Image (cartoon, rainbow, N blue to C red):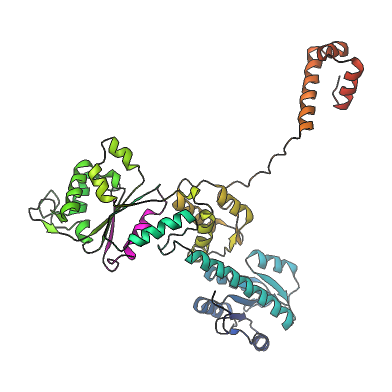
Amino acid sequence: MSGKPSKAERKILIVEDDPGLRRQLRWAFESYQVLTAENRQSALEIVAREQPPVVVLDLGLPPDADGPSEGLATLTGILELEPECKVIMMTGQAHRAYAVEAVAGGAYDFYHKPVDADILGLIVTRAYELWTLEEEHRKIARYSAGYEFPGFLTTFPKLQQTLKRVRDVADSDIGVLITGESGTGKELIARGVHQHSRRANKPFVAINCAAIPDHLLESELFGHEKGAFTGAIKTTIGKIEQASGGTLFLDEIADLSLPLQAKLLRFLQERVIERVGGRTTIDVDVRVLSATNQVLNQAIEAGLFREDLYYRLSEFSIELPPLRERGDDAVVIANDLLGKLARDLRRPVRGFGADALSALAAYDWPGNVRELQNCLKRAVVTAKGRKVTAADLGFETPSPEPKRETLQEARDRAERATIENAMAVSGGNISNAAKILQISRPKLYNLLRRFEIET
């Protein structure tokens, strides 16, 4: 990617209250840019400012130099600020429970003093290399194809090709209709189209047509003059005028009433509007993008949506597939979101457990990316350890796959059931049961012993 990092980029923070040991460790890590702190406050200030990938942290810090409380509190504070940071706890105390508690609290490793510079150096090198690999993965996810639409991430090849086509038409003024289920990212695509257009430095105005009562929506779109209706105490411009020179995004366009559809069509044809209660036409230069989670062809057939308006809005159409049809996108998006959420919510969560990754990949996500975001937010807040588990996500731990029956096992099960039934019908009489089964009594005795059936 970017080659071997320079010394200035290879930061390491040493948190140690013993000045002699601080000097020794500074010398031991001379190939790094060494930052030092002697207490929790100074350590957290440096982490917030410098964001070091690796921290060597003494467990016993003042005012609890002989106990673990201050060191563990510092560990928690560091991981709240930098969840991806690799923290190596270091102590001269012999209590094994401290090591367990530190690792459970998110420490990358635990090292017992006295310091052997070579051994500690190997631990630090390994921690730094792991952080580097994880950071490269985060960059790949962040800048994979499709991320030029800010906030919209996909590695699904078919969707990547679609987004390239959208990027090609973004700089024109043609109308774009975006369809797809709720939560698939339609507004993110609309914002991306705007940002890649010649109107990028002009307003982007969005309005949800389903969220505003129909009797108010006309005024919201076209504005109104003072006195146009009760409560209209001043002239107010609508969303269309607000977007002048820029982009108007009409979300849930299928929810427009037929009269408003007619008025919107007139605007799209003539590029002029009249405010509610007004008599003057106003020229407006605006690009219109629209979106819906409904199938407009069905709405047209049902007489609920104007066909001529549909063709005006859909000069270019894009359909966003649901998350369940986008390959590994649920896992890719989850990995990208987790670090951001952990940082924003100040939680020391570092990744997903294997069961959580399996659950993320297997679930259908009917609410799409919006549901995934909400699920991750809850998991980050409630997670007890460094890794998010399937239980943290609200999924049951998958039960073991049931044992598959062999042909011989199936035959034995059927044979045993048939013998038990014959014995029951005959009231336990061996002779009668043998006649029912059409076998000899000796053979029936052998079968009863084999299947351990009580006579």
Residue drawn at (68%, 70%) of the image: 109
Q: In this view, does 381 lie to the left or right of 210?
A: right
> Horizontal and vertical percent for residue 407?
76, 32
The tally of labels here is 0
- Is any atom of residue 83 visible in this view? no
Residue drawn at (47%, 45%) of the image: 366
Looking at the image, is 420 positioned above or below residue 7?
above
> Horizontal and vertical percent for residue 428?
84, 14
- Is any atom of residue 394 visible in this view? yes
Q: Is residue 133 covered in magenta?
A: no
Quadrant of the rendered image containing residue 422: top right
> Horizontal and vertical percent for residue 354?
63, 55
The quarter of the image holding the C terminus is top right
Looking at the image, is 331 positioned above or below residue 339?
above
Q: Is residue 190 covered in magenta?
A: yes
Residue sitting nearer the eye, 444 or 218: 444
Q: Is residue 295 left or right of residue 402?
A: left
Q: Is residue 66 left or right of residue 363?
A: right
Question: Which residue appears farthest toward the right when viewing the image?
Answer: 442
Looking at the image, is 240 positioned above or below residue 69?
above
Q: Point out the stretch of residues depicted in magenta.
A: 182-208
Residue sitting nearer the eye, 78 or 207: 207
Quadrant of the rendered image containing residue 129: bottom right
Looking at the image, is 398 positioned above or below residue 92?
above
> Horizontal and vertical percent for residue 283?
14, 59
Q: In this view, does 226 lie to the left or right of 450?
A: left
Residue sitting nearer the eye, 47 or 203: 203
The quarter of the image holding the N terminus is bottom right
